[in-house]
Amino acid sequence: MDMTIPVPRGSRRVEILGTADRNLKMLRETLGVKIIARDDEVRVSGDADAVIVVRNVMERLGKGGRNGDAPSRQQVLDLITDEISQERTGGRSEPRSGIGAGPLSWEGSLQVFVDGRRTEPRTANQEAYLESIRTSDLTFGIGPAGTGKTYLAVAAAVHLLRTERARKLVLVRPAVEAGEKLGFLPGDLVEKVNPYLRPLLDALHDMLDYQTISRYLASDVIEIAPLAFMRGRTLNGSVILLDEAQNTTAGQMKMFLTRMGYGSKMIVTGDITQIDLEDPTESGLIDAARRLGKIPGVGFVTLGQADIVRHPLVQQIVQAYGEQEDTDGR
């Protein structure tokens, strides 16, 4: 949908559009629309519902300008959120992509199949984990290898992409396993970080065909990013998955969590018994569990040996290496 919205000139134009068109940039990033400001008009194109939200927000900013109120950045964000909420509840029960769907959620089973079988939780803890992902904007899945914490997170993300509730999937992992720096590895950024994100890509290849993955990567629907490259970003309308989070520092974890934008969902997975940092007490995953465990809307789910669903020997191997059953970390 395309729309032209008239705007006044002079000081009131700045009050509506923001200094250096700041308000338009916020609308563009939050709603995924294209906005061009020229002379006394703003041209908007994109999803019909998102374009209507832009118009309504600008109208409300215009009323504020006439009263002499110059809205702050947070007030503009609140206006956008309020208009998104009103647009969603005003005429549709099912959200569409492009408008910022609030908390990304779904009803019923995942529409993700592997070898003709639907991807579903196999244990009570896995079911609780998937339910937390469904209902919470931020979920931490903590547990040993083979408990499905990464696999189910990827399945939920694929489901949200396929049903057009999310417009982007960002896969993130700290690159610390071998003690190598990304600059020492050959190739472009994707090739450099590929070895570290291989478990996530393996799960994707189980759920999507090669052509679809290639298309998503080429069009930036799926993005592969080392943790160090997340600084300074705000991700809206996205599923952001941080794997191997036990190998983040507290500072890195804070930086990552604050990348969450409107209409996004974050999933953080890790195993606190496999910390590769020089000082394991500096793990950002343990620190986050301590700081965020009681915040409403943040889900923490602990998986244990009974939730291991790989080869039967894996459970015995974990037990033999002295895996602790209580990995809550809170």
Image (spheres, rainbow, N blue to C red):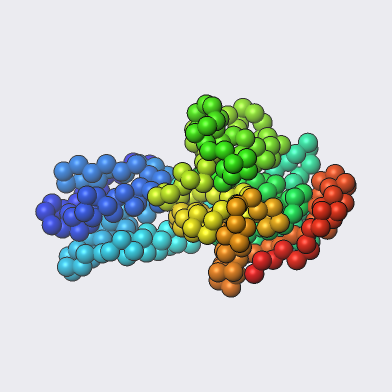
The answer to whether residue 271 is left or right of residue 61 is: right
Q: Nearer the viewer, residue 175 or 301?
A: 175
Q: Position of residue 240 (x, y in %)?
A: 54, 49
Residue 293, relative to residue 263: is it above or below?
below
Question: Which residue occupies 81% across, 49% down?
Answer: 309
Question: Which residue occupies 63% across, 43% down?
Answer: 177
Q: Position of residue 100 (x, y in %)?
A: 46, 53
Q: Nearer the viewer, residue 262 or 247?
A: 247
| Residue 48 appears in the rendering | no
Q: Position of residue 290 (x, y in %)?
A: 59, 69
Residue that extends furthest to the front in the rendered view of this protein: 278
The answer to whether residue 261 is left or right of residue 74 is: right
Question: Which residue occupies 60% across, 31% down?
Answer: 212
Q: Quadrant of residue 327?
A: bottom right
Q: Quadrant of residue 163?
A: top right
Question: Which residue occupies 16% across, 43% down?
Answer: 39
The answer to whether residue 261 is left or right of residue 192 is: left
**Quarter of the C terminus within the rendering:** bottom right
